[in-house]
Image (tube, rainbow, N blue to C red):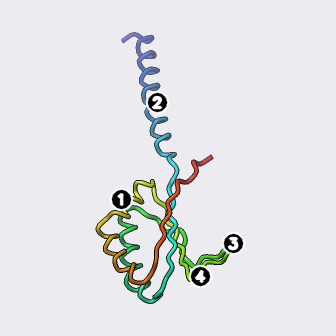
Amino acid sequence: MKTPYVVALSVTAGMVFGAGAIQGLHAQTKPPAYQISLEEVSNPEGIEKEYHPLASAASQRYGSRHIANGLAVSIDGTQPKNLLVIINQWDSIEQIQAWDNSPEYRKAREIGNKYAKFQIIAVEGLAAQ
């Protein structure tokens, strides 16, 4: 093969591979989603022993990464009474919805509803800058 054709073919192949790599990098920059759970607990022992192990296993199975867990502290406004705040990081809001609708979490929630009132919020994170 003549040198100009080899160079042209090499440049074209490099452009194709480079474009594919850029697309792959763009796909990796999707921001994570965060789940905030507020639990108004009426029976702390029941929630810890019966609900949390099942709910935690289900969320990890569906891709959650726990990043915070503890009593809420009000920075502005009225201090919540007896609320537990759990923050999980997920790859997407769709992943949170799949976990929420999963049979594993539905079973945990049936148990949890005996011991607490829940409010679960999801928000998409910001892209890395």
At mark 2, the secondary structure is helix
Q: Amino acid at mark 1?
A: Ala
Looking at the image, residue 77 sits to the left or right of residue 72; the answer is: right
Mark 3 and mark 1 residues within 8 Å of each other at the beta carbon: no
Tell me which amino acid carries mark 4: Lys
Q: Which residue is mark 1?
A: 98
Residue at horizontal 34 percent and vertical 63 percent from the top: 101
User: Where does label 3 land, which residue?
Assistant: 77
Question: Residue 77's image quarter?
Answer: bottom right
C-alpha span from label 2 to label 3: 50 Å
Mark linked to residue 11: none
Residue drawn at the location 51% of the way across and 45% of the way down: 29
Give the Cα distance between marks 3 and 1.
Answer: 33 Å
Viewer-closest of 82 and 25:
82
Mark sitting earlier along the chain (4/2): 2
Q: In whole angstroms, how far apart are the C-alphas of marks 4 and 2?
A: 54 Å
Rendered location of residue 91, percent (x, y): 45, 55
Q: Which mark is residue 81?
A: 4
Camera-near label (4 vs 2) is: 4
Q: Residue at x 40, y 57 (%)?
A: 95
